[in-house]
Image (tube, helix red, strand yellow):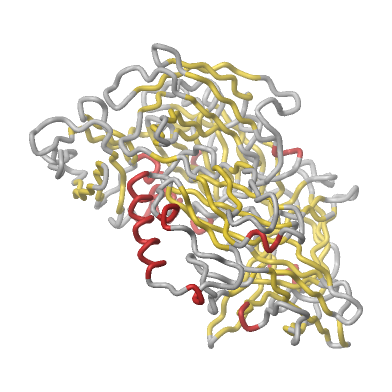
């Protein structure tokens, strides 16, 4: 049984569109009340701020749980309370919308869990409440239902209603008023029926939006009306200069005809998919008829100001029983037409085989009705270079514990398979349980292949540097350092419970853990040398200082974050866990100065390390080299206009 992943699964983690609201709960879960506070830039109580906490499931399957959204309002002391689902990880921020459309916001808090006491500090840079004008949407009115999704920097996805004009004669474009989200930037995804028609990135902060409006207005002053794509009118000068309005342009519907052939002629019922991201997420678009032809509807390609764009490409792939995966990159402008297609884009498929894999549990019994994540790769020769096209599919085993992988061959390989299992601690993050199987060999193996779980599940206790339990610490296990990068969907991620304990899959690889106070990495063979496995973390390197302006006054709300981490990593650490310390440092080295301009940085250190940090106040940026050996940073930084 194939569970198709929708087209709007983007970024480094997968996500779904419709999966619940603030009133929904995971089956069998209970809510835990947390308390926190919000502070202004002056470090005073932030009264009347709205606090939003969100938890998103990774996949649209029961094992991943449901979306949960909670809101609260701070009292006169800046305090608030919220009820979180036990075992869920949340992102959260606080905001207050003012009458002029300016939004005061805090920075984003990640990995908020039951037992946390979050403190939100107002960000120095205000944001704006933005309305998006969708130019060209009216041409799609009779094609299907419209839907839109806003995705913020934390990966949260929020459905947004589209306010369409009452009729096609209206001179006003369709619009959607965006909710207030965390982060500096966001993305809008729109589709009509099953057809994706827009992917648009936009700034949220007030100052970048003001600069963007001036640049867009200057661009339109250089354009003639005939330069715009048919059906798109030039926005008014007033809206172009309004920083609360974002303009997005959508091309008219166009027809694309794809014809699929095999060695025996046209292939009927071949599936055509659009590839929507570098991870191989796809959206189903159509199937071929008895002549092997599928006519698809796509938008005419246009650029960011509504001009025809001739260089736009579209990644498609074709799947047909008994044939190998066929990815293609189509130059859209060369093949689309307004009326019936004149020419077919032809795709020829090579013969392939079907691999059958029986997934076994630790007890060697078949895993029935279990979700399995599979990454398939197809080798393509382009311009004397070999490229890899990835396809990510989510399957379920049948009653015999078997999954079927069709279309494998000499160019289409399976590169990774993992069983998805609900975590005992974090029910929003599905565990990736590695299988003991030779994935590339499946392309030539015609008999049933057995895939038992690798190793065994073991319990480990994680302790902070002071030997207290490291509650809610991040723990990751990997078989090879190359698998340990932020974009990998096959990272085995865990979180300790309130006692600092967690059950992880024991393999021949390595294990790393990080809490608010420390970090450590070990080989699994060293960590689990004894039955009572314990891992004591080592304290982070720290640096404390003060940011001041040219009058030597402290600067509250300055953002301090890591920009560059180019120092050579210790070879032993690199061979053990790859790029994980660099990735976790990006999260650790990101803080804001308090009301006295003071900051406190912590990071994972290794010998010969070099760090460069950025101090940001409004539009001002300063980069300072931090010498870990000295453990200090210059505090007499001066900013213009202060």
Give the total number of marks visible in the rendering.
Answer: 0
Rendered image quadrant of residue 21: top right
Query: Residue 46 appears at what percent x and percent y?
Result: 37, 20
Residue placed furthest toward the top? 76
Residue drawn at 81 percent across, 56 percent down:
2
205 left or right of 267?
A: left
Residue drawn at 64 percent across, 59 percent down:
137
Is 528 above or below relative to 327?
A: above
Residue drawn at 14 percent across, 45 percent down:
640
Query: Residue 122 appears at what percent x and percent y?
Result: 35, 30
Q: Which of 161/602 is in front?
A: 161
Rendered image quadrant of residue 592: top left
Query: Residue 580 appears at what percent x and percent y?
Result: 44, 49
Residue drawn at 49 percent across, 48 percent down:
186
Query: Residue 222 appears at what percent x and percent y?
Result: 38, 72
Q: Which of 440/436 is in front?
A: 440
Q: Evaluate whether residue 436 shows in this view.
A: no
Looking at the rendered image, the quarter that the C terminus falls into is top left
483 left or right of 126?
A: right
Is 373 above or below relative to 34?
A: below
Residue placed furthest toward the left? 551
Is 593 above or below relative to 58?
A: above
Q: Which of 339/234 is in front?
A: 234
Q: Which of 311/583 is in front?
A: 311
317 left or right of 269?
A: left
Q: Evaluate whether residue 449 shows in this view.
A: yes
């Amino acid at each position: 049984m194939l569970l198709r992943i929708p087209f709007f699964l983007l970024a480094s983690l997968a996500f779904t569109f419709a999966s619940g609201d603030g009133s929904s709960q995971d089956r069998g879960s209970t809510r835990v009340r947390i308390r926190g506070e919000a502070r202004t830039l002056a470090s005073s109580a932030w009264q009347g701020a709205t606090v939003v906490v969100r938890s998103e499931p990774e996949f649209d399957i029961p094992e991943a749980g449901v979306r949960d959204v909670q809101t609260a309002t701070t009292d006169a002391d800046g305090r608030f309370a919220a009820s979180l689902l036990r075992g869920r990880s949340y992102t959260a921020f606080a905001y207050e919308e003012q009458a002029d459309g300016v939004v005061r916001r805090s920075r984003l808090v990640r990995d908020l869990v039951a037992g946390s006491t979050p403190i939100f500090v107002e960000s120095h840079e205000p944001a704006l409440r933005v309305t998006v004008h969708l130019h060209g949407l009216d041409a799609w009115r009779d094609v299907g239902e419209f839907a839109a999704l806003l995705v913020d920097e934390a990966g949260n996805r929020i459905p947004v209603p589209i306010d369409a004009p009452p009729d096609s004669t209206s001179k006003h474009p369709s619009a959607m008023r965006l909710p207030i989200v965390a982060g500096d930037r966001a993305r809008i995804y729109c589709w009509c029926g099953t057809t994706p028609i827009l992917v648009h990135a936009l700034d949220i902060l007030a100052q970048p939006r003001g600069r963007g409006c001036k640049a867009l207005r200057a661009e339109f002053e250089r354009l003639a009306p005939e330069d715009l794509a048919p059906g798109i009118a030039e926005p008014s000068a007033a809206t172009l200069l309004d920083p609360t309005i974002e303009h997005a342009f959508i091309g008219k519907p166009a027809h694309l005809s794809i014809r699929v052939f095999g060695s025996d002629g046209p292939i009927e019922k071949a599936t055509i998919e659009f590839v929507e991201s570098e991870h191989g997420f796809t959206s189903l678009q159509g199937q071929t008829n008895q002549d092997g032809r599928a006519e698809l509807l796509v938008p005419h390609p246009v650029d960011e100001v509504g001009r025809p764009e001739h260089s736009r490409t579209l990644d498609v792939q074709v799947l047909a029983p008994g044939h190998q995966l066929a990815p293609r990159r189509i130059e859209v402008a060369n093949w689309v037409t307004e009326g019936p297609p004149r020419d077919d884009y032809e795709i020829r498929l090579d013969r392939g085989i079907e691999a059958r894999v029986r997934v076994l549990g630790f007890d060697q019994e078949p895993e029935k009705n279990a979700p399995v994540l599979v990454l398939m790769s197809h080798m393509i020769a382009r311009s004397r270079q070999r490229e890899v096209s990835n396809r990510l599919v989510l399957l379920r085993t049948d009653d015999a514990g078997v999954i079927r992988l069709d279309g494998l061959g000499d160019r289409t390989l399976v590169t990774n398979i993992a069983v998805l299992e609900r975590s005992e601690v974090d029910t929003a993050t599905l565990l990736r349980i590695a299988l003991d199987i030779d994935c590339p060999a499946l392309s030539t193996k015609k008999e049933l292949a057995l895939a038992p779980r690798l190793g065994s599940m073991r319990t480990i206790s994680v302790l902070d540097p002071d030997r207290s339990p490291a509650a809610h610490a991040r723990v990751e296990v990997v078989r090879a350092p190359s698998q340990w990068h932020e974009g990998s969907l096959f990272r085995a991620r865990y979180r300790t419970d309130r006692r600092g304990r967690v059950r992880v899959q024991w393999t021949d690889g390595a294990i790393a853990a990080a809490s608010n106070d420390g970090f450590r990495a070990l080989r699994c063979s060293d960590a689990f040398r004894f039955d009572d496995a314990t891992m004591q973390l080592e304290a982070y390197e720290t640096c404390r200082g003060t940011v001041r302006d040219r009058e030597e006054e402290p600067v509250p709300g300055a953002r301090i974050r890591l920009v560059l981490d180019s120092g050579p990593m210790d070879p032993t650490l690199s061979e053990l866990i790859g790029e994980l310390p660099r990735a976790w440092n990006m999260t650790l080295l990101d803080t804001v100065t308090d009301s006295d301009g003071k900051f406190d940085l912590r990071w994972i250190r290794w010998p010969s390390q070099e760090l460069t940090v950025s101090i940001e106040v409004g539009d001002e940026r300063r980069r300072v080299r931090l010498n870990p050996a000295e453990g200090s940073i210059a505090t007499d930084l001066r900013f213009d206009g202060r």
